[in-house]
Image (tube, rainbow, N blue to C red):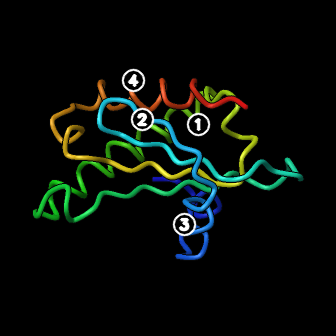
């Protein structure tokens, strides 16, 4: 579980991140990237979203969110987040293609998305 200081919660924070229109796609997961930080001391906030349109069953949606969250948490623990920590917020959006993936595939996809971030 991610610590509270790293979670993106507010609707306005999600909207602000989406408004930047800076995204990456890989294997059924979209990564939305917010603005760059001016103060590097504040932590990067991360949100995980799986729409009801992706799958009608909450169990399936929550499983995908848990897989993405745990993948990110482990990468954070290893300090293997590349340049993603230069941004205020990140949002991972799971699509129906990602529902079939197991943990290893999801972790690999999250890692590849984080590698893609550059400006």
Quarter of the figure that contains the C terminus: top right
Residue that lies at the very extreme toward the right in this rendered image: 39
Q: Please provide percent x and percent y for residue 102.
A: 21, 31
Residue position marked by numbered label 4 in the rendering? 108
Q: Please provide percent x and percent y for residue 39.
A: 89, 53
Q: Which mark is residue 25?
A: 2
Q: Which mark is residue 76?
A: 1
Q: Which mark is residue 14?
A: 3
User: Quick one: label 1, few (<14), some, or many (20+) residues within 10 Å?
Assistant: some
Picture quadrant of residue 61? bottom left
User: Quick one: label 4, few (<14), some, or many (20+) residues within 10 Å?
Assistant: some
Q: CA distance from mark 1 to mark 4?
A: 14 Å
At 72% from the left and 52% from the top, the residue drawn is: 35
Q: Please provide percent x and percent y for residue 67.
A: 32, 43
Q: Please provide percent x and percent y for residue 50.
A: 30, 57
Which residue occupies the foreground of this view, 108 or 23?
23
At 19% from the left and 45% from the top, the residue drawn is: 96
Question: Is label 4 or label 3 in front?
Answer: 3
Q: CA distance from mark 4 to mark 3?
A: 24 Å
């Amino acid at each position: 579980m991610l610590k509270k200081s790293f979670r993106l919660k507010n609707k306005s924070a999600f909207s602000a991140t989406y408004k930047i229109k800076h995204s990456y796609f890989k294997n059924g997961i979209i990564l939305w990237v917010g603005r760059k930080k001016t103060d590097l001391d504040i932590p990067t906030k991360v949100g995980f979203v799986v729409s009801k349109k992706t799958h009608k069953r909450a169990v399936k949606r929550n499983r995908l969110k848990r897989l993405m969250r745990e993948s990110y948490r482990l990468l954070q623990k290893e300090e293997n987040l590349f340049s993603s920590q230069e941004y205020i917020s990140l949002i991972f959006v799971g699509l129906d293609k990602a529902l079939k993936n197991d943990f290893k595939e999801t972790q690999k996809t999250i890692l590849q998305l984080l590698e893609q971030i550059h400006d």
